[in-house]
């Protein structure tokens, strides 16, 4: 049996002694034995995982987690999120429709929705060879599933001709009809010129007339969102104008067919955000990316593939060109003045957090000492220029500058940017002018993008009318500018401005020259420019708004220019301002005050339903404001 036993190591555990160090510094034999392997002991190499194994393991874990979460999402009952919310917050309030139904309200007026630049859908009717298989597929809106595979092809088909504003030869992209086109956020963009040439205005007119006829004579409630408000403003002028330019409805068509126009987040006076889009294809979000990861967007991989293509699309769409600020320096301010003077992010935060009633005189003094941004300087080259007194700014007029010519480059021409023909001298001239207000911004765009602005000035206007009886205002290019057109003769109609407040909204920018390169955009927002006291963050000055449209643009017309009988509202249509503060929602399904998210705001939905059920503006409670829109409107010296 002893031969079958396994031989033990001669030094087993019973014979081991504690290690100790001898006087000469050597360790005991036991310590040495651990360091020196015996001949019969097998040395085993350590296993090492390669980087490829690690990545495969991580990808596998991610896929398993994704499918597990997807399984849970489809497995749990629809009522589970509501159950979880009720456990945390208590019983949920009824949705607006259920709440008002219990109060006995029923629909009375037909409703027409007018989608905005991000809530319509576009589909392909005719395309190039690269778009094979995409007939009647969405190019804008929906999931974009088929388009993701062909990004270059998508850009080619979504871009319009920069001179005519129409589809390029061999391409037809058309809006999708019905509610399905505007069933969610990302469902697309309609371009006004495509609507006009596809008789959309005539179809809207016919549908409204049919709704009124089939509802026992009840007038319709129109609900435009965002740029849809400008489109419908154009429609109200078109429908009453004589053919062939207008719809031939006669001077009282709106009075006979429309009860109310409920404008939601309407950029009536444009948005400064459009300027940064045209100058450098940027926004506050891009500026923050630059601040967090400098050089990320400037490398050769991302810059041509992202910003240049964004610029190519934005310069060719009339829906973005229509967002250039209207009203010039009278509305938006000059080098030394703006309606929002005194607005401070710190002041707003202190007022919000304070629960004490301070001495009025002391509060007024504190506000007067608050350092405010020069919001009238929409674009400034350098933070020092944005803050300096106007007398200290040495400006050189750019309009007489001679543009240079860069060498022909096929890649640049494929990306398309009008900067290609400016050269170093033209770029330097723009920066040497130092700072731009709303009026000089229009001149600047004519200089850097002449093709885009030639088309723009043929379709839109950006000024203020002195004499509304001037025959030139019968031209359709003025009809979407509320400061150069009149509301219809419909004294019984009501107009509402519904919009969100409480979100930092882009108002002005600090720019710098970008590194010169053949295919790079020569200007960029200076993301290093910051000043909390003047609401400057990442090169962007912010004011109160819904994150996209400043309060001034959304509320001024109903707060002042259309209020009462004015030259813009000769029949005295009643106007109301209803603001919705951006705050945490009461349920997971409720929207807040952001530009698109406001469409799910319960308070807004309830107001809309009450109007559709027959309520007037006075029955809603009249004006409801959280911002300084009436104070700012009074500062604007506009003859009404």
Image: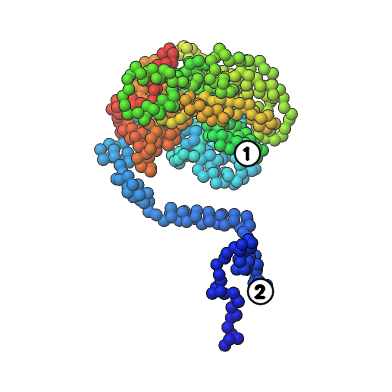
Residue 135 at what x, y percent from top left?
A: 57, 44
Upstream in sequence: badge 1 or badge 2:
2
Label 1: how many Cα within 10 Å (few below 14, some 14–19, many 20+): few
Residue 407 can be seen in this image: yes
Task: Locate residue 476 relative to residue 589 in the image: left or right.
Answer: right
Task: Give residue 4's position: percent from left, percent from top.
Answer: 59, 85
- What number is the disc on residue 40? 2
Disc 1 is placed on an element classified as: loop
Query: Is residue 78 rendered to the left or right of residue 453?
Result: left
From this view, report whether residue 500 is shown above or below residue 430: below
69 to 547, vertically: above or below: below
The correct choice, above or below, for 432 with respect to 157 in the image is above
State which mark lies toward you, 1 or 2: 2
Residue pictured at 47% horizontal, 21% vertical: 372
Q: Residue furthest front?
A: 23
Q: Nearer the viewer, residue 54 or 299?
A: 54
**Colour option used:** rainbow
Q: Residue furthest bottom?
A: 1
User: For the residue labelled by badge 2, is the local secondary structure a helix, a strand or a loop?
Assistant: loop
- Report x, y in % for residue 499: 40, 29
Give above or below for 163 relative to 135.
Answer: above
Q: Badge 2 local density, few (<14 within 10 Å), some, or many (20+)?
A: few
Residue marked by disc 1 = 302
- Residues 45 and 319: in front is 45
């Amino acid at each position: 049996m002893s031969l079958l036993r396994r031989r033990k190591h001669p030094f087993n555990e019973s014979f081991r002694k504690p290690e100790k160090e001898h006087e000469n510094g050597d360790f005991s034999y036991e310590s040495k034995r651990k360091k020196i392997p015996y001949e019969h002991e097998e040395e085993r190499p350590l296993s090492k995982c390669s980087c490829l194994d690690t990545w495969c393991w991580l990808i596998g874990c991610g896929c398993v987690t994704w499918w597990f979460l997807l399984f849970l999402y489809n497995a749990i009952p629809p009522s589970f999120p509501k159950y979880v919310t009720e456990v945390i917050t208590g019983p949920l309030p009824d949705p607006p429709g259920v709440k008002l139904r219990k109060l006995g309200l029923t629909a009375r007026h037909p409703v027409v929705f007018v989608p905005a630049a991000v809530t319509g859908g576009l589909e392909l009717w005719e395309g190039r060879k690269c778009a094979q298989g995409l007939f009647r597929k969405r190019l804008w809106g929906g999931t974009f599933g088929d388009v993701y595979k062909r990004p270059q092809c998508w850009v080619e088909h979504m871009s319009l001709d920069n001179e005519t504003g129409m589809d390029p030869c061999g391409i037809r992209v058309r809006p999708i009809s019905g509610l399905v086109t505007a069933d969610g956020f990302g469902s697309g963009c309609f371009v006004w010129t495509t609507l006009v040439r596809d008789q959309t205005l005539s179809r809207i007119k016919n549908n409204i007339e049919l709704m009124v006829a089939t509802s026992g004579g009840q007038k319709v409630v129109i609900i435009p969102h965002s740029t849809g408000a400008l489109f419908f403003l154009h429609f109200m002028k078109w429908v009453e104008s004589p053919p062939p330019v207008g719809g031939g409805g006669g001077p009282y068509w709106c009075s006979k067919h429309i009860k109310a126009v409920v404008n939601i987040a309407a950029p009536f006076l444009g948005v400064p955000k459009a300027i940064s889009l045209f100058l450098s294809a940027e926004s506050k979000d891009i500026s923050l990316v630059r601040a967090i990861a400098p050089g990320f967007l400037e490398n050769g991989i991302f810059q041509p593939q992202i910003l240049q293509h964004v610029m190519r699309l934005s310069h060719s769409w009339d829906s973005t060109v229509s967002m250039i600020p209207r009203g010039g320096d009278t509305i938006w301010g000059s080098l030394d003045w703006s309606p929002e003077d005194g607005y401070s992010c710190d002041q707003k935060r202190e007022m919000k957090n304070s629960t004490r009633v301070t001495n009025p005189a002391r509060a007024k003094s504190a506000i007067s000492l608050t350092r405010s941004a020069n919001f009238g300087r929409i674009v400034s080259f350098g933070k020092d220029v944005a803050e300096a007194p106007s007398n200290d700014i040495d400006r050189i007029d750019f309009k007489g500058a001679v543009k240079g010519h860069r060498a022909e480059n096929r890649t640049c021409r494929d990306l398309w940017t009008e900067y290609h023909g400016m050269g170093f001298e033209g770029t330097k001239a723009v920066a040497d002018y130092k700072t731009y207000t709303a009026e000089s911004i229009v001149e600047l765009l004519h200089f850097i993008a002449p093709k885009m602005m030639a088309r723009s000035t043929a379709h839109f206007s950006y000024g203020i009318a002195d004499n509304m009886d001037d025959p030139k205002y019968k031209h359709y290019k003025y009809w979407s500018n509320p400061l150069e057109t009149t509301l219809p003769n419909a004294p019984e109609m009501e107009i509402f401005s519904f919009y969100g407040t409480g979100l930092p909204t882009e108002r002005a920018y600090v720019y710098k020259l970008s590194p010169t390169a053949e295919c790079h955009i020569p200007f960029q927002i200076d993301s290093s420019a910051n000043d909390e006291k003047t609401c400057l963050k990442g090169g962007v000055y912010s004011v109160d708004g819904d994150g996209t449209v400043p309060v001034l643009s959304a509320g001024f017309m109903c707060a002042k220019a259309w209020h009462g009988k004015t030259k813009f509202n000769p029949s005295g249509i009643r106007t109301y301002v209803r603001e919705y503060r951006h705050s945490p929602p009461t349920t997971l399904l409720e929207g807040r005050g952001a530009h698109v998210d406001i469409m799910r705001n319960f308070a807004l939905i309830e107001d809309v339903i009450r109007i559709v059920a027959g309520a007037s503006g006075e029955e809603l409670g009249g004006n409801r404001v959280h911002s300084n829109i009436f104070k700012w409107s009074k500062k604007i010296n506009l003859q009404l």
